[in-house]
Image (tube, rainbow, N blue to C red):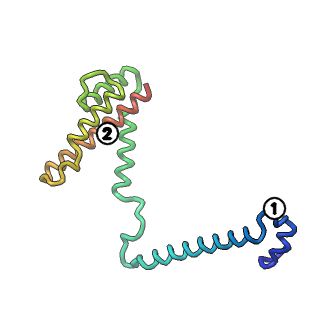
Amino acid sequence: MTSGNDRSGLDDRLGGRLFGGEARTADYQAWAERLRAKRDKAKQTIADTKNPHDASTEPNYWSTDALYAESARIRDSEQATVNSPWEAEERKAQLAFDLGMHNEINLPNATEAYRRLAKLHHPDRYTDAEPTIQDHHASEMVKINSAYRALKKLLADS
């Protein structure tokens, strides 16, 4: 076995010209050194910004947002779950009503209704309004998103 300094013997045995020889070895060594420098710089940045007395710098995998996002995903999948074709049609009709659809229930019509309601209730439109109005439109947007996701899933399954 050869040491790291005895590269010429290794290149000769492996056919140095075939693999690029010393020039390629130098390129790989320079690349590895750049990666080490980048890793060390990132570690130093993290060490400089971390305050041992501040718990907020630690990653929080159980944040409220993450928990509610999972709950919303489960709720949406349960909304789209049906046991019979009759139940599916009834559920589609209810979701279409929630989206204000009065025409044929299909994906293009559902998308059009969703976009119309999203333009009306999107929270970004009410940033200067009173908090009660903001909360109302935010909750309406949550209902609209939920109904649209469930209806899309039901339409895709049928």
Looking at the rendered structure, the secondary structure element under dot 2 is: helix
Instruction: State which quadrant residue 59 falls in.
Output: bottom left
| Lower sequence index among marks 1 and 2 | 1
Q: Mark 2 points at which residue?
A: 146
Q: Mark 1 points at which residue?
A: 18
Tag of residue 130: none
x, y percent for residue 10: 83, 71
Q: Distance between the residues labelled 1 and 2?
A: 60 Å
Label 1 Cα crowd, 10 Å radius (few <14 / some 14-19 / many 20+): few
Q: Which amino acid does label 1 sit on?
A: Leu
x, y percent for residue 158: 43, 24
**Is 136 above or below relative to 157?**
below
**Is 1 above or below relative to 107?**
below
Q: Which amino acid does label 2 sit on?
A: Ser
x, y percent for residue 128: 15, 54
**Is 76 above or below relative to 53?**
above
Instruction: State which quadrant residue 15 falls in.
Output: bottom right
> 124 or 143: which is nearer to us?
124
Quadrant location, the N terminus: bottom right
> 27 or 37: which is nearer to us?
27
